[in-house]
C-alpha cells in the first residue's frame, strides 16, 4: 500500500495486516483494524486472543514483525511509547505500571516533568496539575501519599490521571480499566469516556464485562486466536452473538446448576479481629461455597489475610476440622490445608519470571520430591492436569508466566492452589480480568471441587457472580459481618442495604 493508501475521513488510525510473533506462539496474525474518530471502539475476545498485544503495537510498547500503521494518510512506526505519545496516544494498562515508592503527583507527571530552568523540577506546577486532573475525576487524593500505600482502585485512578494531565490526547487505550474500581468510580469513568468522545478523542476499550460494552460502545471488534473475527456496530449485535464469536462455541448457563451436599464444618472463624476488622465469627462446611460480599473497603480481603496469617490478628481463633489451628503465616495456613488466591495476581498471585510449571508446582514441591529429586512424571501429570482443566493458553508449560495474557496469568494463580489439594480455598476476585468462556470453566471447576468435599470462601465485587455462585452469603461493612443470607434470600437490594449498613 505505502504512499497510495488513502485514509477514510472517519478513521484516525489504520492498522494493516499487523503480525507479532513471540517465542513459540504467533500472537497476532495479519490483523487489520480501523480506529474511528471520536468513538468508543471496543475490542473483545478470550484471554490470549491478541487484544492487549495489538494495543501495545498502537501504543509503541511493542513493535510488529510485519504490517503497517497509518495516521491519516501517513505511515507511522512507533519505536517506543514516547513516539506514540507525540501523536496523542495514551494507554491505561490492565496491570498497573506505577511507581509504588513515589507519591501521587510524581506518578502522574512521570515522563512529563516540568522544570524551572533546565534542571530543577517545578513541583508546584506538578501538584497544581495533578490536583486539577484528580478533581476532574472526582477523586481527590493526598498528593504526597506514597502510591504503594493506596488501595488498587485509587491506583487505577492515578493511572487514568497520568493520561489526562496534558490536553494533547487524541487516542486513549483502556485495557480492563474498571476491574479494581467501585461502582461509583466506574460511573465517574464512564462519564469521563463520554466527555472525551465529545472532544473528539478516540477510545479503544478492552473489557470482558458485556454490560459495560453495551453501555459504552459504538463499535465492537471480536478477536480470536490472534485474528480478527468480526467488526459490527453495537446496535447490530447481541450478547449471545458476541459470546459465540469470542469463544467459537455455545456456552451453557453462566452459573452451573448446583446440588450441594454439605458435610462437617471445615473452617471455623471465632472472634477474629485485626487492624481493619471487628470481631468476626463464621464457619464453612464441606461442599459449601460461602460468599463474602460488600463494598470496596468493607474488610473482605483483610479478613481473608487474617485467616491465613498474612496480617497479625489482635484476637480470635481459627479451627480446621474442629481442631485449633495455630496460623501465624501463610506457610502455617498451607500446612493446615488453607489456600488463598489473591486478587493482586501481579504481586502476590504468580511469579512472572518463572515458568507455568514452577508456578503451579511451587506449593507442592515437597510432595513431588523423592529424597532430593522431584518426580518428573508426577510433576508433568499435575501441571498438565490443571493446564488442561483451566485451558491455559500457552505453547508450553515451560513458558514464563510474564509472557502470558493477564487472564491466563490469573488461571495459573488459581491452578497453583488447586494443585496444593487444600481442603479450604479462599478465592479473592478469582475471575478478575478473565473472559466469559474462562469464567465458566472456573465456575465449573469450583463446583467440581465442592463435590469432592472442599469448602470455598469466595470474594467477588461482581454482584451477579457472588449471587450465582454462593450457597450462603456473608455481607460485610466497616470490617464487620453485618448480614447473613441463605440462597433463597439473595437479592441485590438486600445485599446493597446490608453493605451500606442500612438495617431499616
Image (cartoon, rainbow, N blue to C red):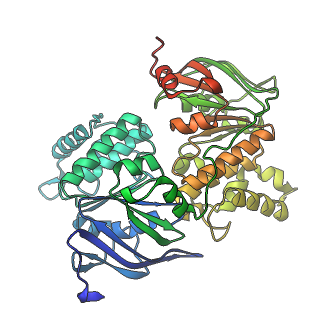
Instruction: Specify whether residue 346 is in view.
Output: yes
Position of residue 226 relative to residue 261, above or below, is below
Quarter of the picture holding the N terminus: bottom left
Position of residue 208 relative to residue 484, above or below, is below
Residue 6 appears at what percent x and percent y? 23, 82
Name the residue located 68 percent from the left edge and 66 percent from the top edge.
Answer: 397
Q: Quadrant of residue 83?
A: bottom left
Query: Toward the viewer: 399 or 428?
Result: 428
Instruction: Specify whether residue 459 is in view.
Output: no
Horizontal side, residue 252 vs residue 57: left or right:
right
Q: Quadrant of residue 309?
A: top right
Residue 46 appears at what percent x and percent y? 54, 60
Query: Toward the viewer: 349 or 488?
Result: 488
Query: Toward the viewer: 103 or 224?
Result: 224
Position of residue 60 relative to residue 197, above or below, is below
**Residue lying furthest front in this view?**
236
Q: Quadrant of residue 382?
A: bottom right
Name the residue located 38 percent from the left edge and 70 percent from the top edge.
Answer: 57
Horizontal side, residue 366 vs residue 331: left or right:
right
Amino acid at each position: 500500500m505505502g504512499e497510495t493508501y488513502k485514509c477514510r475521513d472517519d478513521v484516525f488510525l489504520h492498522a494493516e495486516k499487523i503480525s507479532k510473533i513471540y517465542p513459540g506462539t504467533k500472537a497476532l496474525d495479519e490483523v487489520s483494524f480501523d480506529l474511528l474518530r471520536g468513538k468508543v471502539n471496543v475490542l473483545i475476545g478470550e484471554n490470549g486472543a491478541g487484544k492487549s498485544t495489538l494495543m501495545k503495537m498502537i501504543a509503541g510498547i511493542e513493535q510488529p514483525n510485519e504490517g503497517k500503521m497509518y495516521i491519516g494518510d501517513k505511515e507511522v512506526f512507533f519505536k517506543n511509547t514516547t513516539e506514540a505519545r507525540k501523536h496523542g496516544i495514551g494507554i491505561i494498562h490492565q496491570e498497573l505500571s506505577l511507581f509504588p515508592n513515589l507519591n501521587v503527583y510524581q506518578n502522574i507527571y512521570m515522563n512529563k516533568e516540568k522544570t524551572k530552568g533546565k534542571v530543577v523540577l517545578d513541583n508546584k506546577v506538578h501538584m497544581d496539575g495533578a490536583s486539577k486532573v484528580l478533581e476532574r475525576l472526582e477523586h481527590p487524593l493526598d498528593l504526597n501519599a506514597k502510591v504503594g500505600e493506596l488501595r488498587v482502585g485509587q491506583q487505577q485512578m492515578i493511572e487514568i490521571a497520568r493520561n489526562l494531565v496534558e490536553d494533547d490526547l487524541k487516542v486513549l487505550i483502556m485495557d480492563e480499566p474498571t476491574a479494581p474500581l467501585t461502582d461509583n468510580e466506574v460511573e465517574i469513568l464512564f462519564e469521563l469516556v463520554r466527555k472525551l468522545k465529545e472532544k473528539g478523542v478516540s477510545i479503544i476499550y478492552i473489557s470482558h464485562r458485556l454490560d459495560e460494552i453495551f453501555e459504552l460502545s459504538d463499535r465492537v471488534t471480536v478477536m480470536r486466536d490472534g485474528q480478527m473475527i468480526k467488526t459490527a456496530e453495537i446496535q447490530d449485535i447481541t450478547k449471545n452473538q458476541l459470546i459465540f464469536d469470542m469463544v467459537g462455541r455455545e456456552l451453557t448457563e453462566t452459573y452451573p446448576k448446583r446440588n450441594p451436599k454439605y458435610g462437617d464444618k471445615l473452617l471455623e472463624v471465632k472472634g477474629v479481629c485485626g487492624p481493619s476488622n471487628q470481631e468476626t465469627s463464621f464457619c464453612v462446611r464441606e461442599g459449601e461455597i460461602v460468599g463474602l460480599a460488600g463494598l470496596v473497603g468493607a474488610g473482605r480481603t483483610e479478613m481473608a489475610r487474617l485467616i491465613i496469617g498474612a496480617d497479625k490478628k489482635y484476637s480470635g481463633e481459627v479451627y480446621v476440622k474442629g481442631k485449633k489451628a495455630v496460623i501465624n503465616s501463610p506457610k502455617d495456613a498451607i500446612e493446615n490445608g488453607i489456600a488463598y488466591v489473591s486478587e493482586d495476581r501481579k504481586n502476590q498471585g504468580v511469579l512472572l519470571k518463572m515458568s507455568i510449571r514452577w508456578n503451579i508446582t511451587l506449593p507442592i514441591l515437597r510432595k513431588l520430591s523423592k529424597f532430593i529429586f522431584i518426580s518428573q512424571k508426577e510433576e508433568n501429570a499435575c501441571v498438565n492436569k490443571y493446564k488442561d482443566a483451566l485451558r491455559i493458553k500457552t505453547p508450553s508449560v515451560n513458558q514464563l508466566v510474564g509472557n502470558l495474557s493477564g487472564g491466563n496469568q490469573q488461571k495459573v494463580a488459581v491452578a497453583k492452589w488447586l494443585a496444593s489439594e487444600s481442603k479450604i480455598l479462599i478465592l479473592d476476585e478469582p475471575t478478575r480480568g478473565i473472559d466469559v468462556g474462562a469464567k465458566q470453566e472456573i465456575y465449573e471447576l469450583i463446583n467440581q471441587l465442592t463435590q469432592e468435599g472442599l469448602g470455598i470462601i469466595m470474594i467477588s465485587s461482581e454482584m451477579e457472580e457472588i449471587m450465582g455462585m454462593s450457597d450462603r452469603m456473608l455481607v460485610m461493612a466497616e470490617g464487620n459481618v453485618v448480614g447473613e443470607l441463605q440462597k433463597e434470600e439473595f437479592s441485590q437490594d438486600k445485599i446493597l442495604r446490608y453493605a451500606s449498613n442500612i438495617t431499616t
